Structures are given as C-alpha cells and as structure tokens.
Image: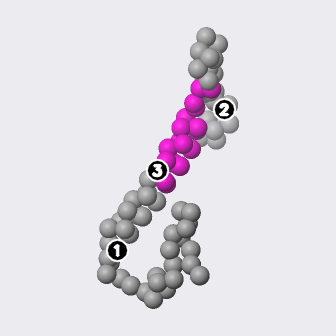
C-alpha cells in the first residue's frame, strides 16, 4: 500500500507572482529571497557581536613595541616608517 501511495503524483504548491497592479513597487520578495537576506543579516550581526565582545574584553594596558612604529594613515592601520 505504501509504495502505491508514494507513486501517486502530488500537486506542488507554488508561490504567487506579483500582481500587475503592484508591479510599480518592484519585485515581490519570495520566501527563499527572505531566507537568504535574513541569514546574511544574522551572520553579519553575529560577526559584529563577536567583535564587540573582543573589544570589551581587550586589555587597555596591553603594549607591544611594534605599536611605537605603527599608526592609522588615511583610515588604514599600517606600519609607519
């Protein structure tokens, strides 16, 4: 019985398309698009949270002699000569 039940074709449910009257609003976001966007957003938030935690746990008294010859130039941290 179960093999006969598996052989029967089932109707695949499809998502609706954007109605013509609302096409001026842009493309309609489907669930797969939302999931991609949400997953990317949460990855970025997790990465930021890790960086914030690292900054909070940083020792302000930490010193290396390489810091004497390093600095920020044009917004980029690099060794100064």
State the residue at coordinates (32%, 78%): 59
State the residue at coordinates (64%, 13%): 20
Question: Does residue 60 appear left or right of residue 20 in this picture?
Answer: left
Q: Image height check: is 22 above or below 56?
A: above
The alpha-carbon separation of the residues under discs 1 and 3 comes to 24 Å
State the residue at coordinates (46%, 82%): 67
Determine if the magenta segment contains residue 32: yes
Give the magenta-colored segment's residue range: 27-44
Indicate which disc, 3 or 2, sits on the residue closer to the N terminus: 2
Foreground pick, 7 / 58? 58
Residue 45 rendering spot, x and y as whole percentages: 44, 53
Q: Which residue is mark 3?
A: 42
Residue 38 rendering spot, x and y as whole percentages: 50, 44
Residue 48 rendering spot, x and y as whole percentages: 43, 58
The alpha-carbon separation of the residues under discs 3 and 2 comes to 40 Å
The alpha-carbon separation of the residues under discs 2 and 1 comes to 62 Å
At label 1, counting other C-alpha atoms closer than 10 Å, the crowd grade (few under 14, some 14-19, many 20 or more) is: few
Question: Does residue 63 appear left or right of residue 44 in this picture?
Answer: left
Mark yes or no: residue 1 visible.
no
Verify CB contact (< 8 Å) between mark 2 and mark 1: no
Quadrant containing the N terminus in the rendered view: top right
Q: Which residue is mark 2?
A: 8
Q: Which residue is mark 1?
A: 58
Q: In the rendered image, which quarter is residue 81 located in?
A: bottom right
Number of the front mark, 1 or 3: 1
């Amino acid at each position: 019985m179960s093999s006969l039940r598996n052989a029967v074709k089932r109707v695949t449910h499809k998502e609706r398309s954007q109605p013509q009257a609302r096409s001026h609003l842009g493309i309609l976001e489907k669930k797969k698009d939302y999931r991609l966007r949400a997953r990317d957003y949460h990855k970025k938030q997790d990465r930021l949270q890790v960086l914030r935690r690292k900054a909070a746990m940083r020792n302000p008294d930490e010193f290396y002699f390489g810091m004497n010859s390093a600095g920020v130039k044009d917004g980029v941290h690099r060794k100064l000569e």
